[in-house]
Amino acid sequence: MAKIINGKEIAEKFRNQIKERAIEIKKRGIEPHIALINTGDDPASKIYIAGKEKLAASVGISSTVHKFSNDTEENEIAELIEKLNGDEKTHAILLQSPLPRHLQFRRLVDLIHPSKDVDGLTTLNQGKLFTGEPTVAPCTPLGVLHLLHTVHENIAGLHAVVLGRSSIVGKPLAQLLLNANCTVTLLHSYSKDPPDICKTADLLISAVGKPLFIGSEFVKPGATVIDVGISRIDGSKKIVGDVDFEEVSRVAGAITPVPNGVGPMTIAYLMHNTLGLVV
C-alpha cells in the first residue's frame, strides 16, 4: 500500500510556522490583513470563504469579507478593488471564484494591484512566474509542491505529468515544476493516450475535476500521486477526487487522500502569501 500524504497534518505544522511569522510582523507594529471578495450565492464559495476567514484569525491575520449579491454589476466590484488597492492597511486581496456568469473573472482579477495579488493570478504575476522572475505564485500549486517535497527531498530530474491546464492550477504548477528542474508533461482534454503517458510519470498530479478518473492503469508502480480534484458523486454528500484512491493506493508509492490532501495546503499558502505581501 502507498504512503498516505496527510495534507491536514502537514498543513497544521506549516500553519504553526505562519503563526510565528505573523507574530514577528506584528512586533513591527503591522497588522497583516487580507480582503476576501465573495460574489453570488455559490454554496461552496461561502464555505471556502468562511474557512479562509477562520484560518486567518487562527494564525494572527485579520480579514474582511466583502459580500456581493448574484446580480452585482462589474463596476461595483471594480470600485471596491480600486479602493482596496489604495488602502495601506490591506495587504492582500482575494477574488473568490467562480463568479456569476455575467461577470468576467480575468478582467476583475487584473484590476487587483500585483503587489496585493495573494493568489498570483493577475496577468503580470503569472507572466513573471513563466519568465522566472520573483513573484507570488498561486496557492494550490505551491501546496502541491510542498506535499511533493515531504516525499522527495529533491525532485530535480523526475518526470512530472500534470493533468489539467487551468491558469489557477495546471499551468502555474507545470512552471513551478520546471523551475524545480523536473521534466514536465502537461496533459489536457485533447491529449492522446493519457494513461500511457501518465504511466511514465514519477510524479502524477491530477487537476481535471473528473471524479475517480485516474485508475491504476494511469499509474507507474511506486509513483507519487497528488489529487487536486474534488467532487461530489451522484448528488450525495460523499466527496471524492480525480483519483480512485482505493485502487491507485495499491500501485502508487505515495498518494494524497481527498479530502485532507491538497485542500488544507491551499488555504495555508493563502496565509503564507498574505504575509509575503506585507512590506
Image: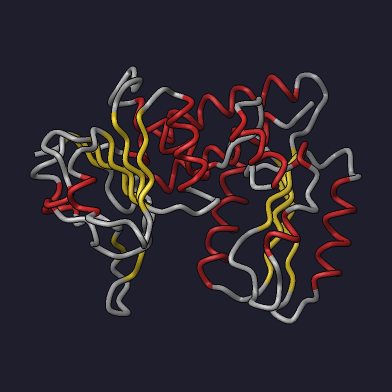
**Image quadrant in which you'd find residue 238:** bottom left
* Residue name at image x 47 percent, y 29 percent: 14
Q: Nearer the viewer, residue 240 or 62?
A: 240
Q: Position of residue 12 (x, y in %)?
A: 43, 34
**Image quadrant in which you'd find residue 226:** top left
* Residue name at image x 27 percent, y 78 percent: 234
User: Going by the image, does 221 lie left or right of 17?
Assistant: left
Q: How many marks?
A: 0
* Residue name at image x 36 percent, y 45 percent: 162
Q: Position of residue 193 (x, y in %)?
A: 22, 55
Q: Position of residue 155 (x, y in %)?
A: 34, 23
Q: Nearer the viewer, residue 219 or 72?
A: 219
Q: Assign the N terminus to one quadrant of the image.
A: top left
* Residue name at image x 62 percent, y 44 percent: 119
Q: Nearer the viewer, residue 132 or 62?
A: 132
Q: Assign the C terminus to one quadrant of the image.
A: top right
* Up/down of 220 relative to 231, above or below: above
The structure's colour scheme is secondary structure
User: Going by the image, does 123 lie left or right of 166?
Assistant: right
Q: Position of residue 187 (x, y in %)?
A: 35, 51
* Up/down of 245 relative to 128, above or below: below
